[in-house]
Image (tube, helix red, strand yellow):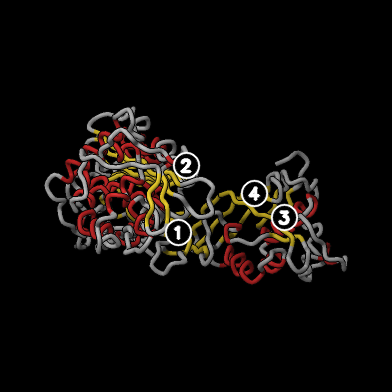
Amino acid sequence: MRSGAKIGIVGGAFALVLGGVGYGAYNVLDGLGNGTGDATSTAADSSEVRTGPVTEKEIAETSKKFLAAWAKGDATVAAALTNNKGDAEPALTGFSESAHVTKAVITPGAATGSTVPYTVKATVSYRGTSKPWSYASKLTVVRGLTTGHALVDWEPSVIHPELAKGESLETGQASSAAIEAVDRNGQVLTTEKYPSLGGILAELRQKYGEKAGGTAGIETWINSANADGADKTLLTLVKGKPGRVQTTLDGKIQAAAERGVKKFEKASVAAVEPSTGAIRAIANNPPTGFETARSGAVAPGSTMKIITAAMIIQNGLGSANAPVECPSTVPWEGVVFHNLDDFSMMDNPTLKRAFARSCNTAFIKPVLPLKGKRDTALGIEAKQYFGIGLNWQTGMVTVDGKVPESAGAETAASYIGQGKVQMNPLNMASVTATAVRGQFLQPYIVPKDLDNRTFATASPLPPGVSSQLKDMLRYTATSGEGTATQAMAGVGGDKGAKTGSAEVDGHATSDSWFTGFSNDLAAAALVQSGGHGGDAAGPVVAEVLRAGP
């Protein structure tokens, strides 16, 4: 607390500690109105509707009044200081009535622009049991569109940083039995050690806690906005008896995945074992919120050329060591497709070398003669041999990839991982694992016999196709001209990789993709707006592969 600041105790148990927003040292009730709910009396004194950015003084006064009213437990006054009173008031009311917060001290920090951070130190009490609860959040002050008043821009995260629209806080007997999830070696998996696993562990608990013999405890949690979603535990007041759930994750590889994604904003990675389909690691940065590694659905860029290469080989349009053309551009039904920086290969390249250099035109031009099948061939290849588009039963919710039928220029775009093709890192790690093993094995995170679910299956790749794909991947990761060579330099063992960049509408910089394998581990990463695949996603995959067998 800043020197000289007072602590104003309001409502007996709640307080606002003034520390860093520039309020000076005075009681928190100053300026809160006359007790009739007129929380915006200062702004309302003038008939003139203010415009323009909020001032430093408005930011300080509005945030102080809001936090003080919230600390007092006066949801009506606090909600009136936001730009969405209808949503704010029940959420603020629920903080004490549903979440059972009985004491709270809110300490604001120094404002950055119009955003004010603060810490909440609270006590949650339920049926004679109490436990301290602390966290940090922030609010932003904006100017009201119709009134011109300075108001808190309402988001559920104002109450708690992990709270999203449609969600609420609650304390009581947990809705699902507790679990103790362990990795393949019996090591306990926790969100404190592996932050990216929060959503997965919550889902495993909801699905398998009771089956594993667990019992529910007393907790504070976030009610999921999705009827089928997992609630997220924030605080445990009384522990339930945990049921042991065996996962396929590997703590060492998971730790490497967590380190890897921290290298970049909006990064995600997944790793699977080609010989079994077992998921060994899955991580995202940021670690909370949307989990791109298993739920993303975005264009995979040139990593898709693994499937396109298989399609070319199986349809008799080429082979790894057969010559191809790699001009700087190629037309397709009125649209011209380019290589990066319009490069060309004029030294009699093979499909393997074009794969290593990531020549777009070499993966579009050979398909031109495939009359009658051009719009469907890639989707058939992806589904029939790589398991993409099937209903994966991994033991957790996943988005399982999509290569739909296309037409016109979208067909050519799909061959290089654009158009309507949608993937995530788990999908692409599986694609690489399939290329390495020669047969798709559905990824999974808990054993099939835990709930007798049915795994998706696909046909094995025809003889010789897998060996050609592995040869192409190895060359891309080890040759002087391979785009993945630099990123894979520190990875040992039998190794291979493919880079990718995917253009995204409205983004100045492309998404960075990279997928690779080392021995019996395959991994894929996506760094959104990361640029070239080898520059951003490559180091993430390399970090994971180095931790493998």
SS category of the residue bearing label 2:
loop
Q: Is residue 502 above or below residue 487?
A: below
The type of residue carrying mark 1 is: Glu
Residue 156 sits in quarter: bottom right
Dot label at residue 137: none
Q: Nearer the viewer, mark 1 or mark 2?
A: 2
Q: Nearer the viewer, mark 3 or mark 2?
A: 2
SS category of the residue bearing label 3:
helix
Mark 3 crowd level (few <14, some 14–19, many ≥20, 10 Å Cα):
many
Q: Which residue is mark 2?
A: 531
Residue 475 position, x and y percent, is 26, 33
Q: Is residue 197 above or below residue 476?
A: below
Q: Which residue is mark 1?
A: 219
Q: Nearer the viewer, residue 440 or 164?
A: 440
The image quadrant where one finds the N terminus is: top right
Dot label at residue 63: 3
The type of residue carrying mark 2 is: Gly
